[in-house]
Image (tube, helix red, strand yellow):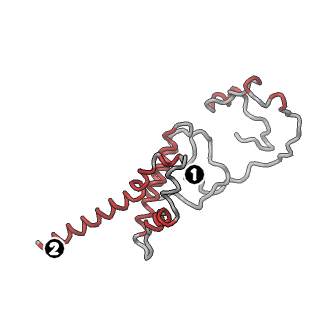
Amino acid sequence: MPYTASNPQPASSDELRARIPGWGVDLDPKDRPSVPRERLDLPTGARWEFPERQPGHEAREKSIEHKFVTPVFGTSMPLKGLSGAIRRYAYRCSEARAAHWLILIAGDRVDAWESHLASFATLRPDNPIAQTGVRTELSHHGVSSRIGQKRADVNHQWLDPIIVAGPWVLAGAGVFSAIRAVRRRRRT
């Protein structure tokens, strides 16, 4: 239950410890570095009522660590398509697990590819040469800024063309082979 003016008492330590994994690990003053200067007698000035819930909270994704979605939330980028399904699946895992975050990253990558594919249906499709910075590498000393420098990205520099251009080359090869297959069928 949230803290409001009508319910100013927080839950007991035992209730919180049972409901939230890891709650209370810093209860012992020896475990808190701020204890010598910590003052609890100062007024906070915080007075608020629990706000009215924004409509649509039933379908929103939320962490399994939280009881409910915050009363106000953003809806500027609603989940859609395969990337949305992947992101919804990520919220079945705890935020404390790497799987949650890795699945969210996978959802972002799928969303990027969905956007690339959707751009081909428009009058201005994505331009991989301009948008990946390949021209800038050639015109603004991209290679010379890495050679002889103690930069961290030099170790994986050889992977950059594969990661950036590889998917576009594979997609182009797929389109080329599809066109070739269609032409062969028409001839026979």
Q: Disc 1 and disc 2: Cα gap in Å? A: 53 Å
Q: Earlier in the sequence, mark 1 or mark 2?
A: 1
Would you say 121 lies left or right of 55 here?
left
Which label sits on residue 186? Answer: 2
Query: Which amino acid is tagged 1?
Result: Glu
Neighbours of disc 2 within 10 Å: few (<14), some (14-19), many (20+): few
The x, y position of residue 149, in whole percent, is 54, 49
**Residue 82: quarter of image:** bottom left
Q: Nearer the viewer, residue 100 or 14?
A: 100
Q: Residue at x 55, y 46 (%)?
A: 150
- In this rendering, the answer to whether 186 lies above or below 111 is below
Neighbours of disc 1 within 10 Å: few (<14), some (14-19), many (20+): few
Quarter the C terminus occupies: bottom left
Pick out the residue farthest to the right: 42
Would you say 146 lies left or right of 22 here?
left
Residue wearing tag 1: 58
Q: Residue at x 51, y 61 (%)?
A: 141
Q: Secondary structure at mark 2?
A: helix
Q: Residue at x 85, y 34 (%)?
A: 40
Q: Nearer the viewer, residue 69 or 183?
A: 183
Query: Which amino acid is tagged 2?
Result: Arg
Q: Secondary structure at mark 1?
A: helix
Pick out the residue farthest to the bottom: 123
The x, y position of residue 36, in whole percent, is 83, 28
